[in-house]
């Protein structure tokens, strides 16, 4: 057997260089590159290996371990899971920073390869810098925290272990049914230890991803149930996009006259103007999608995980409604006691369509009526401005607070009006990205994609801080398109480190920062459940030792300019229009729009419910009322 002597780290990088993927007879490299933040746990071993062995791989310097990993997640998501980045960190806190990103990837079923440095396998210099010592188990390190948030975990304590570990890692990374974060922990001594590796291990390896066909009997059971339904409804999940079943899904809906709602991951698989597209469904859904869903006698979920936001905590659907689930994952297909079609979405829809020849749903004019009503509401949201009744469903104290902020900051823009303008004035093929706060709700309801795959929302983990980092990842995946990140001020403050990376790499991303001086979404939840405002608004400490003073005025545009980005401060509609126009002429430099918006000017409601915590005992009447309402909804929600 021919061998080559390499360190563990050198062998790892050489292996990554030669991994390819084949999908529908299209072959391409699977690992695009590596995001790096070197430290003492990886700079000598893996860092040296990257310098020596990386030929095709693109190398990016991250600024925060969580941020660079989030960029890798967004890249893989926008690439429909057909290409990934590896991400490496030092030992200890650098590794711990990536745990959140690992959870984000796994919750969303997005492949990412994490390569954290680790403490010494030999244990001779223990305890080393940044090592946690557990007296009951000396084999534990920070990297064991990755175990519950990864789909595959391994630690390489001998160089020869790398081979089986990487084979298994790429088995998971290329598995459409069970992919997510993969962690290969690399002790810093093992990284540099040498071994005579078989040359064959580094030959070009192609990972073939086939389209799993549906079982004939499963398709027949699904078809039989659909034929009995009078008012079926489809749900377009992320699996439609990852399967590249966009056209098949739209054709299925149109052929049989079945309307559909979109999950956050499925949105933009079909353009918003499609007659049967009712928009977002569930907690952050549209009125038309939720109204149709409540009366549907059959739900056909395609590539959806049925999160609580999609199902309104299992309360949304008629108690007599049945379910058909088409999903590559048997685990997901079994949800809600459904008839299970475990298969690739594209192939399953094609086959199911043949079995339903002659079938038509019985909707008459219901779809048009529901959509017309929603379009009227969209028109209202689009034009909402200061001076109108823009404050939805909040108590008098919060209304006064909102007006106080508006006066102090001098803004006249509502969040919904700003979103409408951005949607209208950006390019048709521009990609929009978001993750947390009130913006995902507004966007799932209001954003109208005019081209497919132009909506990249991380909502499986709803991870604050993903927005700016994710925009960089999307830009790397789609360099020819404009990318717009929708971030609240809370998320921006939490993590915007990769804005500097975007400056460094000359990647133009457009950060739309909506500043309402609060964690507005959580403040709504807090107050809506009968509580007083507590630590959810950005205010100075007041004389009574509470945060009830004036709102903080933060110049986020100045922060962006300090990094080397272009920036605009926006308080009016005219400011926003001008800034968007001027920004289109900017090349190779990230831009930031510091948009001061009126608090409490986000969307809300539309026939949904979300099961959240409540206080069964309280001295506040508002808490008791909220508890009573939650318990009433729980009674009518599905139990399985």
Image: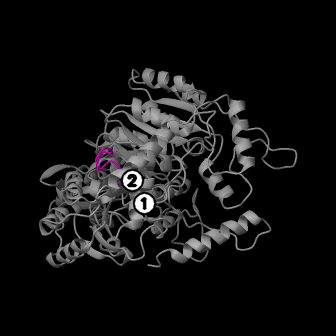
Q: Nearer the viewer, residue 32 or 414?
A: 414
Tell me the number on the disc at residue 370: 2
Q: Which residue corresponds to the image point at 42% horizontal and 76% vertical from the top-left?
A: 319
Q: Secondary structure at mark 1?
A: helix
Residues tagged 2 and 1 counted as in contact (Cβ below 8 A): yes
Q: How far is disc 2 from disc 1 in space, using C-alphas? A: 8 Å
Main SS, magenta region, reads: loop
- Rendering quarter of residue 540: top right
84 over 283 or under it: above or below? above
Would you say 595 lies left or right of 536 here?
A: left
Q: Secondary structure at mark 2?
A: helix
33 over 338 or under it: above or below? above
Q: Residues within 10 Å of mark 2 (few under 14, many from 20)?
A: some
Q: Which stretch is magenta?
A: 264-275
Q: Nearer the viewer, residue 540 or 523?
A: 523
Residue pointed to by mark 1: 291
Q: In terms of sequence position, does the residue under pointer 2 or pointer 1 come before the other?
A: 1
Instruction: Answer whether residue 369 is magenta in the image.
Output: no
460 over 599 or under it: above or below? below
- Rendering quarter of residue 197: bottom left
């Amino acid at each position: 057997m021919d061998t080559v002597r390499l360190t563990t780290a050198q062998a790892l990088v050489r292996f990554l260089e030669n991994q390819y993927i084949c999908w529908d007879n299209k072959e391409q490299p699977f690992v695009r590159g590596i995001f790096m933040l070197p430290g003492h746990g990886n700079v000598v071993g893996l860092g040296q290996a990257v310098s020596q062995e990386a030929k095709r791989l693109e190398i990016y310097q991250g600024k925060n371990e969580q941020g660079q990993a989030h960029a890798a997640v967004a890249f893989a998501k926008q690439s429909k899971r057909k290409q990934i980045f590896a991400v490496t960190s030092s030992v200890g806190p650098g590794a711990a920073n990536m745990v959140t990103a690992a959870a984000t990837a796994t919750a969303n079923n997005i492949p990412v390869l994490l390569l954290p440095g680790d403490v010494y396998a030999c244990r001779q210099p223990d305890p080393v810098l940044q090592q946690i010592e557990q007296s009951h188990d000396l084999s534990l390190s920070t990297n064991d925290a990755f175990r519950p948030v990864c789909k595959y975990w391994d630690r390489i304590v001998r160089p020869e272990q790398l081979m089986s570990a990487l084979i298994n890692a790429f088995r998971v990374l290329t598995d459409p049914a069970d992919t997510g974060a993969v962690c290969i922990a690399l002790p810093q001594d093992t990284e540099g230890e040498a071994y005579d590796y078989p040359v064959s291990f580094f030959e070009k390896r192609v990972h073939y991803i086939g389209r799993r066909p549906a079982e004939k009997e499963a398709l027949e059971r699904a078809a039989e149930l659909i034929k009995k339904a009078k008012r079926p409804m489809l749900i377009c999940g992320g699996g439609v996009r990852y399967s590249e079943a966009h056209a098949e899904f739209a054709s299925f809906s149109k052929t049989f006259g079945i309307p559909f709602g979109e999950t956050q991951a499925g949105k933009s698989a079909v353009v918003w103007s499609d007659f049967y597209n009712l928009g977002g469904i569930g907690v952050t859904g549209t009125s038309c999608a939720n109204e149709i869903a409540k009366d549907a006698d059959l739900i056909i979920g395609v590539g959806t995980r049925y999160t609580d936001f999609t199902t309104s905590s299992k309360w949304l659907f008629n108690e007599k409604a049945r379910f058909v689930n088409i999903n590559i994952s048997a685990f997901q297909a079994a949800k809600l006691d459904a008839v299970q079609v475990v298969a690739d979405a594209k192939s399953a829809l094609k086959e199911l369509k043949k079995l339903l020849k002659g079938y038509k749903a019985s909707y008459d004019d219901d779809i048009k009526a529901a959509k017309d009503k929603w379009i009227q509401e969209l028109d209202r949201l689009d034009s909402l401005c200061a001076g109108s009744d823009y404050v939805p469903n909040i108590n008098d104290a919060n209304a006064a607070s909102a007006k106080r902020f508006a006066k102090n900051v001098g803004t006249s823009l509502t969040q919904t009006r700003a979103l409408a303008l951005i949607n209208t004035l950006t390019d048709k093929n521009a990609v929009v990205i978001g993750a947390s706060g009130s913006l995902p709700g507004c966007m799932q309801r209001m954003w109208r994609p005019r081209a497919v795959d132009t909506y990249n929302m991380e909502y499986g983990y709803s991870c604050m801080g993903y927005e700016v980092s994710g925009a960089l990842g999307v830009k790397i995946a789609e360099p020819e398109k404009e990318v717009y990140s929708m971030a609240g001020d809370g998320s921006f403050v939490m993590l915007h480190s990769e804005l500097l990376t975007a400056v460094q790499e000359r990647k133009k991303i457009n950060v739309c920062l909506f500043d309402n001086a609060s964690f507005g979404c959580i403040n709504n939840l807090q107050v809506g459940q009968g509580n007083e405002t507590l630590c959810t608004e950005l205010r100075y400490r007041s004389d009574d030792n509470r945060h009830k003073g004036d709102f903080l005025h933060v110049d986020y545009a100045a922060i962006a300019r300090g990094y080397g980005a272009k920036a605009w401060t926006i308080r009016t509609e005219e400011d926003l229009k001008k800034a968007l126009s001027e920004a289109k002429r900017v090349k190779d430099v990230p831009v930031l729009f510091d948009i001061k918006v009126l608090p409490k000017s986000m969307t809300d409601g539309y026939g949904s419910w979300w099961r959240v915590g409540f206080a069964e005992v309280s001295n506040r009447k508002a808490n008791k009322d909220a508890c009573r309402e939650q318990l009433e909804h729980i009674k009518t929600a599905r139990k399985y």
